[in-house]
Image: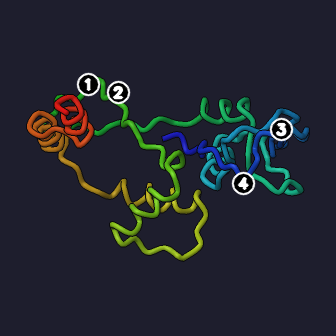
Amino acid sequence: MNGFSTEEDSRSGGHDQICCLIESGDRCTRPAGNASYSKRIQKTVQQRKLRLTRDDSVNHIYICEHHKNMIQSVRIKRKRKDSEDGSGSPDGEDEIQEIDFFQMPVNTLRRYKRHFKLPARPGMNKAQLADTVARHFKTIPVVEKEALTFFIYMAKSFKSRFDQKHIDSMTS
């Protein structure tokens, strides 16, 4: 999970804004993209001792592609624990593929929160909601072999609604 929110938000108008960061004392003049400078990203910047700060005089948190790539390049990848059968790579270098909840639509995050009855205050912004969902998601125990076996069984045994509609339209 890369932690950057990249969903287009027509209200933010991120395309005509300048990056909200100050690098080594100089204000960045590059155009802001859709990536936001969330609290979690700020923490990464502090931990990695990057010389980046947010310009408090700016009323948005969008950053340019240059700074997004700079931050992503210094982030530590988490290593996967050996699976149950011990068939992980011999040097233990498997990586966990994380889900970037910041790229999901707000409605999806709200449905997830509602489904799992997550405690959260009303009026949370997208970054807070994504962070809450991500923290909860990491706590769900998954037996990989069982999940994959079930997925393959379901994929082979049952056609999706799209497949069914496609078949129905061909027979009509």
Q: In which quadrant of the rendered image does the C terminus lie? A: top left
Q: Which numbered disc, 2 or 4, marks the residue that appears first in the sequence? A: 4
Circle on res. 11: 4
Q: Residues within 10 Å of mark 3 (few under 14, many from 20)?
A: some
Report how far apart the C-alphas of labels 2 and 4 lie in the structure.
42 Å
Name the residue located 67 percent from the left edge and 47 percent from the top edge. Answer: 36
Q: In this rendering, would 89 be left or right of 47?
A: left
SS category of the residue bearing label 1: loop
Residues 113 and 140: in front is: 113
User: Where does label 3 land, which residue?
Assistant: 23
* Tag 3 and tag 4, C-beta contact below 8 Å: no
Q: What's the amino acid at mark 4?
A: Arg
Tag nearer the camera, 3 or 4: 4
Tag nearer the camera, 2 or 4: 4
Q: What's the amino acid at mark 2?
A: Glu
Name the residue located 79 percent from the left edge and 47 percent from the top edge. Answer: 53
Q: Which numbered disc, 1 or 3, marks the residue that appears first in the sequence? A: 3
Report how far apart the C-alphas of labels 1 and 3 lie in the structure.
39 Å
* Tag 2 and tag 1, C-beta contact below 8 Å: yes
SS category of the residue bearing label 3: strand
Above or below: residue 133 compared with residue 144: below
SS category of the residue bearing label 4: loop
Q: Residues within 10 Å of mark 2 (few under 14, many from 20)?
A: few
Name the residue located 11 percent from the left edge and 33 percent from the top edge. Answer: 156
